[in-house]
């Protein structure tokens, strides 16, 4: 079967800008770890299937350019790009993209406070801070660590834990966020880390958490998710700050 040709349409160019920007924002805010984490974003193709942009192996996120992103198909085969993809990346991301059609953007990180929760026996996000309530009824937990995700079986196992959820805490490992676009995914990633940070700070006092009732938690979650304007504005503000800091960062689009 011949693959449909990929052209750098305006939507694909914008996807490159959004994903590269998200990677840079994550590095600026210390949400990444070395060159080991990965973000992906699906891009519709002319034949009705999807291709996926993903960050390349071995490039520091603060230096990522839109042209550095690698375009792969649903099986992880490279369609376009000058770099390679880290092996575990698409075993995790590919399975989730295929199984969850609304998960158009997937962000996996080892950000410190959220990852710290995955190291605790029965560690979970508590419904105690306003930031945590945006994730009420959206979180799942994988309580079993099985080493690096180096095959489809492990990718499928991780994906199965996300049934009915958009956020996954991965035991002894890190977190994974799914959303319909890069702006929503990044906003969730940012506030997830903030929620975990204030929870761990509060728990470090040794005093009991002041938890919110399920009724109020559900109400607050609806208020957050029914209107995602703040998520879009947050992402746009970060994009503006990036352009101001480095006006030339999009110049390489001409070389794609």
Image (tube, rainbow, N blue to C red):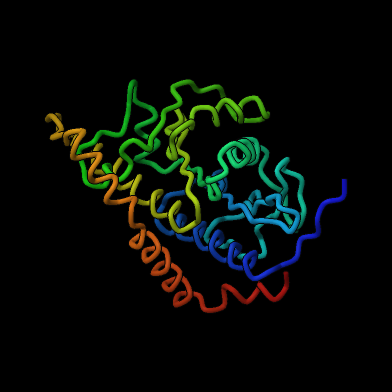
Q: Tell whether 103 sits left or right of 55.
A: left
Q: How many marks?
A: 0
Q: Position of residue 45 (x, y in %)?
A: 71, 56
Q: Nearer the viewer, residue 129 or 251?
A: 129
Kindly give the residue lying farthest to the right in the view shown: 1
Q: Tell whether 211 sits left or right of 146.
A: left
Q: Position of residue 125 (x, y in %)?
A: 30, 34
Q: Tell whether 133 sits left or right of 20.
A: left
The residue located at (48%, 75%) in the rendering is 243
Q: Position of residue 62 (x, y in %)?
A: 52, 60
Q: Is residue 201 above or below residue 254?
A: above
Q: Nearer the viewer, residue 201 or 210?
A: 210
The residue located at (68%, 38%) in the rendering is 87
Quadrant showing the N terminus? top right
Q: Is residue 118 above or below residue 89?
A: above
The residue located at (52%, 79%) in the rendering is 247
Q: Quadrant of residue 19?
A: bottom right
Q: Position of residue 181 (x, y in %)?
A: 50, 55
Q: Tell whether 205 sits left or right of 25.
A: left
Q: Nearer the viewer, residue 248 or 104?
A: 104
Q: Quadrant of residue 168?
A: top left
Quadrant showing the C terminus? bottom right
The residue located at (34%, 32%) in the rendering is 117
């Amino acid at each position: 079967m011949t693959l449909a040709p990929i052209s750098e349409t305006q939507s694909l160019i914008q996807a490159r800008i959004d994903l590269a920007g998200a990677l840079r924002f994550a590095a600026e805010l210390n949400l990444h770890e070395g060159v080991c984490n990965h973000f992906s974003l699906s891009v519709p193709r002319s034949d009705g299937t999807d291709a996926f942009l993903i960050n390349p192996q071995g490039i520091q996120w603060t230096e990522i350019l839109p042209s550095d992103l690698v375009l792969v198909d649903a099986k992880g085969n490279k369609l376009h790009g000058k770099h390679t993809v880290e092996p575990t990346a698409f075993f995790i991301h590919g399975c989730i993209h295929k199984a969850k059609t609304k998960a158009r953007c997937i962000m996996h990180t080892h950000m410190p406070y959220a990852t710290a929760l995955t190291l605790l026996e029965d560690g979970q996000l508590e419904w105690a801070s306003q930031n945590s309530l945006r994730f009420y009824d959206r979180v799942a937990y994988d309580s079993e660590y099985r080493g690096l995700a180096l095959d489809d079986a492990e990718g499928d196992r991780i994906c199965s834990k996300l049934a009915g959820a958009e956020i996954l805490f991965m035991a002894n490992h890190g977190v994974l966020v799914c959303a319909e676009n890069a702006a929503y995914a990044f906003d969730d990633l940012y506030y997830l880390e903030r929620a975990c940070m204030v929870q761990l700070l509060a728990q470090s006092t040794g005093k009991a958490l002041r938890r919110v009732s399920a009724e109020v938690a559900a109400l607050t979650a609806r208020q957050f998710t029914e209107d995602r304007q703040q998520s879009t504005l947050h992402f746009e503000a970060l994009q503006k700050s990036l352009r101001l800091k480095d006006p030339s960062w999009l110049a390489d689009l001409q070389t794609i």
